């Protein structure tokens, strides 16, 4: 049983068990049925791929198998059925964006190992005094900021004990709303950068792999910032409204000062430091590497906006320092830079920030899911299945414009993300957005980016995202409270994501 499963209620676990059982039965049945009954006007390779793809989607949606195992199983079944040779089916596992995934996960592992994330959280809170409103607003903003650079799941797990201490003396409903902020702010902040959450990278990969459009790191942030700002402001208004209602009802007492909330200690990495903000050597080294990596990711896009796509500096930077290369270089530095000393043979020896035994604990499953999604999507285009699927979507929905497709894809992705993994949702929906845009003859950037953003907006239930499950597992967030506030954030996402993404893509000329 996974750690997330342990945080769910017995009823949620029974639902998940039934869903997995249904998937194990339904997936092979659908595979056989489609192999037998696929349309006569479809090429045999496309028909066999359709059967494999539908079975894979069922396994992903129901989580009948671990999503990473399904990502490997889909290409393997396609090879067995003769869709393409193994060399082609598994070639996408060498996509350069997998290096960006790897590097980003290693950076996050270093921040967690050195406890840099926790120290920054404690240092970044202002002195909120006795104001519950200022306390919760500060924790929300800091959580969103940290989540933009680190895993939203890890950010939520890190912030829950901090926020629990901050709201310990507040009324019961305000405590629940405060803890909800750990999950909701993490999900909102996670969309701000490509490395904040896997759906962002899946959207960028779909554009690169299928539409041959390179979306710079900086441009993604410009696309996500207006949407994230609006949703975060709506959440702040809802949260502060709950505090004021409890104040009027006389159920609110003073909040403890944030100075009373201590960051957890670690014997190896959290000794007294003499660097900025009192950081020790390992934390300073990790922060330096993260800042340099962020500069490497942002600089090409910023220069492109300032100098234009044809400037020699921009062309050289894009060729020499693509995002994946920057991530690998940054990750490698963590295995070299010293963090502390350890005794070997009675003599002190420098210890690097990260060792391989620590780095190997990163989320390899998401990397495999990424590769498997690209492998299946690549064959969808090569077999001609994309044309058939695009025509089907167009005829079934009647959409004819870029705006209509963006609204449709964003809405479907948001709803689906409430029922299954946001990463699996993006892996399924981003290639579909490219296919349909190709058939309509419209630019794919807005629909694909909207898909990536909407896939991370699962606020309604504990099973929607891991951050939701974490705060639900505290026992202080009733399901009714999560659904009440999550509903309004879902509605806000549906209203805000399509227009803001369309506006920014047109403003930046991302066609």
Image: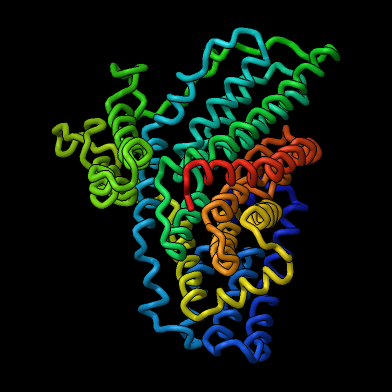
Q: Quadrant of residue 266?
A: top left
Identify the residue at horizontal 67%, vertical 40% (top origin): 496
Q: Is residue 128 left or right of residue 292?
A: right
Identify the residue at horizontal 77%, vertical 24% (top origin): 172
Q: Residue 378, percent across and down?
A: 46, 71
Closest to the observer: 308 or 469?
308
* In the depicted structure, whether residue 316 falls above or below residue 408: above
Closest to the observer: 351 or 479?
479
Observer able to see residue 83: yes
Q: Is residue 287 left or right of residue 28?
A: left
Q: Residue 455, percent across and down?
A: 61, 51
Q: Quadrant of residue 472?
A: top right
* In the depicted structure, whether residue 99 falls above or below residue 268: below
Q: Residue 288, percent across and down?
A: 29, 30
The image quadrant where one finds the N terminus is bottom right
Identify the residue at horizontal 56%, vertical 85% (top origin): 48
Closest to the observer: 337 or 222?
222
Closest to the observer: 477 or 460?
460
Residue found at the far right of this picture: 249
Q: Describe the colour scheme in one phrase.
A: rainbow
Q: Is residue 206 left or right of residue 474?
A: left
């Amino acid at each position: 049983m996974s750690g997330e499963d342990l945080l769910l209620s017995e009823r949620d676990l029974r639902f998940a068990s039934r869903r997995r059982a249904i998937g194990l039965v339904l997936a092979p049945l659908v595979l056989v049925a489609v192999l037998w009954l696929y349309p006569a006007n479809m090429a045999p390779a496309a028909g066999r791929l359709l059967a494999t793809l539908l079975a894979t989607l069922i396994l992903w949606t129901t989580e009948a198998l671990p999503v990473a195992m399904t990502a490997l199983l889909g290409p393997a079944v396609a090879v067995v059925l003769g869709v393409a040779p193994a060399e082609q089916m598994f070639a996408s596992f060498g996509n350069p964006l997998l290096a960006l995934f790897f590097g980003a996960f290693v950076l996050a592992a270093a921040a967690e190992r050195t406890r840099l994330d926790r120290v920054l959280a404690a240092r970044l809170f202002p002195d909120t005094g006795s104001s519950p409103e200022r306390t919760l607003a500060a924790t929300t903003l800091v959580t969103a900021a940290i989540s933009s650079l680190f895993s939203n799941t890890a950010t939520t797990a890190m912030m829950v004990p901090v926020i629990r201490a901050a709201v310990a003396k507040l009324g019961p409903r305000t405590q629940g709303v405060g803890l909800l902020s750990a999950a909701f702010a993490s999900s909102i902040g996670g969309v701000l950068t490509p490395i904040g959450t896997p759906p962002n990278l899946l959207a960028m990969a779909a554009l690169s792999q299928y539409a041959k459009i390179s979306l710079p790191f900086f441009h993604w942030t410009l696309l996500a910032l207006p949407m994230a700002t609006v949703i975060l402001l709506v959440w702040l208004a809802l949260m502060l409204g709950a505090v004021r209602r409890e104040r009027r009802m006389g159920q609110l007492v003073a909040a403890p000062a944030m100075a009373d909330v201590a960051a957890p200690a670690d014997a190896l990495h959290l000794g007294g430091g003499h660097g900025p903000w009192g950081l020790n050597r390992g934390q300073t080294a990790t922060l330096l590497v993260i800042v340099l990596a962020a500069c490497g990711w942002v600089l090409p896009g910023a220069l492109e906006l300032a100098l234009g796509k044809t400037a020699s500096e921009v062309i050289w930077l894009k060729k020499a320092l693509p995002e994946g290369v920057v991530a690998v270089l940054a990750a490698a530095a963590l295995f070299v830079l010293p963090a502390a000393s350890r005794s070997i043979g009675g003599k002190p020896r420098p210890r690097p920030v990260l060792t391989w035994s620590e780095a190997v604990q990163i989320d390899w499953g998401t990397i495999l899911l990424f590769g498997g999604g690209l492998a299946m999507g690549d064959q969808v285009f090569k077999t001609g299945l994309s044309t058939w699927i695009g025509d089907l979507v167009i005829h079934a929905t009647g959409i004819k414009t870029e705006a209509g497709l963006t609204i449709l894809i964003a809405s479907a992705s948001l709803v689906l993300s409430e029922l299954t993994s946001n990463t699996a949702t993006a892996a399924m929906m981003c290639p579909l957005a490219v296919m349909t845009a190709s058939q309509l003859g419209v630019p794919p950037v807005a629909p694909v980016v909207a898909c990536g953003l909407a896939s991370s907006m699962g606020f309604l239930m504990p099973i929607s995202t891991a951050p939701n499950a974490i705060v639900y597992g505290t026992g202080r967030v009733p399901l009714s409270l999560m659904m009440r506030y999550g509903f309004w954030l879902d509605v806000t996402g549906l209203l805000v994501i399509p227009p803001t993404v369309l506006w920014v893509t047109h403003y930046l000329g991302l066609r």
